[in-house]
Image (spheres, rainbow, N blue to C red):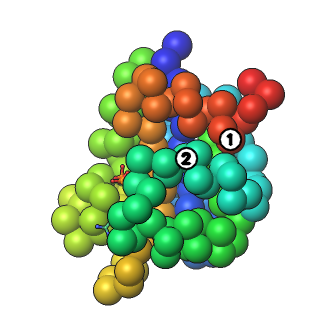
Amino acid sequence: SERTLVLVKPDGVERGLIGEIVSRIEAKGYAIERLELLKARNDQLAAHYAEHEGKPFYPPLIDFMCSGPLVAIIASGEGVIAGFRSLAGATDPTAAAPGTIRGDLARDWGTKVQKNLVHGSDSPESAAREIAIWFPES
Ligand code: ATP
């Protein structure tokens, strides 16, 4: 079935929210196919965020994503790409609706980068590209 790439960003790991976030994915009925705690390499982050290179938030975003371990997850299920984006909520934690991961749990205001706990692929093409970055053997 459909697959998506989820990252629990360093703020989520540091705050002890891995279980809470994985729980929400599982509770929605998606399967966890792969899950790994790892320290992101620069080349992985450069590939992952290639579309944002040159934007003002790009340098602090890369620094933040390197600041501690993250959790890379392949989740699967019908409609999981859009479904996880719904679970995650809006990119900006202030705008994210209550009931979403970011709306309920993200609370890092006023920094140069939005520490918004999670990433989820936004299309089948992104999912395939990102899965190859974080799980090159799969
Ligand atoms: P993600 O790709 O992480 O799921 P997204 O698709 O909602 O988030 P993107 O627009 O792809 O958001 O931005 C990638 C990440 O860069 C965001 O999750 C956030 O951490 C950071 N970011 C995006 N826009 C801004 C901004 N205007 N100011 C600060 N940080 C930003």
Residue count near mark 2 (Cα–Cα under 10 Å), binned few <14, some 14–19, many ≥20: some
Q: Which mark is residue 120?
A: none
Q: Residues within 10 Å of mark 1 (few under 14, many from 20)?
A: many
5 in relation to 45, above or below = above
Q: Is residue 131 above or below residue 124?
A: below
Q: Residue 116 appears at what percent x and percent y?
A: 41, 65
The three-letter code of the residue at mark 2 reads His
Mark before the other along the chain sequence, 2 or 1:
2
Q: Nearer the viewer, residue 80 or 111?
A: 111
Please state the horizontal and vertical placement of residue 125, each as a whole percent of the image: 45, 24
Q: Residue furthest top?
A: 1
Residue in view at x 50 percent, y 71 percent: 59
Residue position for label 2: 48
In this orientation, which residue lies closer to the viewer: 117 or 66?
Answer: 66
Q: Is residue 66 visible?
A: yes
State the quadrant of the C terminus.
top right
Which residue lies most toward the bottom here? 110
Looking at the rendered image, the disc whose residue lies closer to the viewer, 2 or 1, is: 2
Residue at the farthest right position: 137
Q: Position of residue 129 (x, y in %)?
A: 55, 30
Quarter, ligand 1: bottom left
Q: How many marks?
A: 2
Which residue is located at x 55 percent, y 25 percent? 128
Q: Answer left or right for 63 relative to 42.
A: left
- Residue assigned mark 1: 134
| Tags 2 and 1 touching, CB below 8 Å | yes
Q: Quadrant of residue 62?
A: bottom right
Relative horizontal placement of residue 40, taking residue 104 as reference (left or right): right
Q: Nearer the viewer, residue 18 or 109?
A: 109
Q: Mark 2 to mark 1: distance in Å?
A: 9 Å
Residue pictured at 38% horizontal, 22% vertical? 79
